[in-house]
Amino acid sequence: MTTEEIRSRGQALVDALRSWSRDESGPAIGFLHRLVAVGRPVLLRTELEEAFDAEVAREPRLANTPLERAVALAQEAATDGHRVLFALR
């Protein structure tokens, strides 16, 4: 896979996530609040997956979404209490 193909796929995921989150902001915000509530600036992949699974149990609409795909690609996330930044690889 070329760099351009990787970039294109990444952009497609970001676009899908952006579009989905406009329509489904409630469940997305619930998940982000769960991550911030952990209270640590860096969250590892396993912590992201556990938090997402717990949020899906509470809010099944999160399953099979662009957010689920993004979490599956995330290696870690950083938060300052106001934002959550995902490292996707």
Image (tube, rainbow, N blue to C red):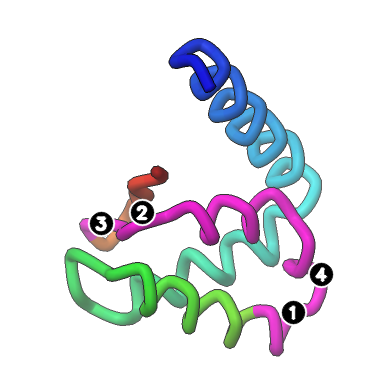
Going from the N terminus, do you reach mark 4 or mark 3 first? 4
The image quarter containing residue 24 is bottom right
Query: Is mark 4 in CB contact (under 8 Å) with mark 1?
Result: yes
Name the residue beneath numbered marker 4: 61
Q: Is residue 59 above or below residue 81?
A: below
The kind of residue tagged 3 is Ala
- Gap between marks 4 and 1 measured at Cα: 6 Å
Q: Residues within 10 Å of mark 2 (few under 14, many from 20)?
A: some
Name the residue beneath numbered marker 2: 84
Q: Is residue 72 magenta?
A: yes
Name the residue beneath numbered marker 3: 78
Marking on residue 59: 1
Give, as a single range, the part of the protein colored magenta.
56-80
Q: Is residue 63 magenta?
A: yes
- Gap between marks 4 and 2 measured at Cα: 21 Å
Camera-nearest residue between 8 and 62: 8
Taking the image as shown, residue 75 lies to the left or right of residue 62, namely left
Going from the N terminus, do you reach mark 2 or mark 3 first? 3
Query: Is mark 2 in CB contact (under 8 Å) with mark 3?
Result: yes
Q: Count all numbered tags in the image, as a single digit.
A: 4
Q: Is residue 45 above or below residue 17?
A: below
Residue at left 34%, top 57%? 75
Residue 87, position as x, y percentages in the image: 34, 47
Residue 89, position as x, y percentages in the image: 40, 43
Marking on residue 77: none
- Gap between marks 1 and 2 measured at Cα: 20 Å
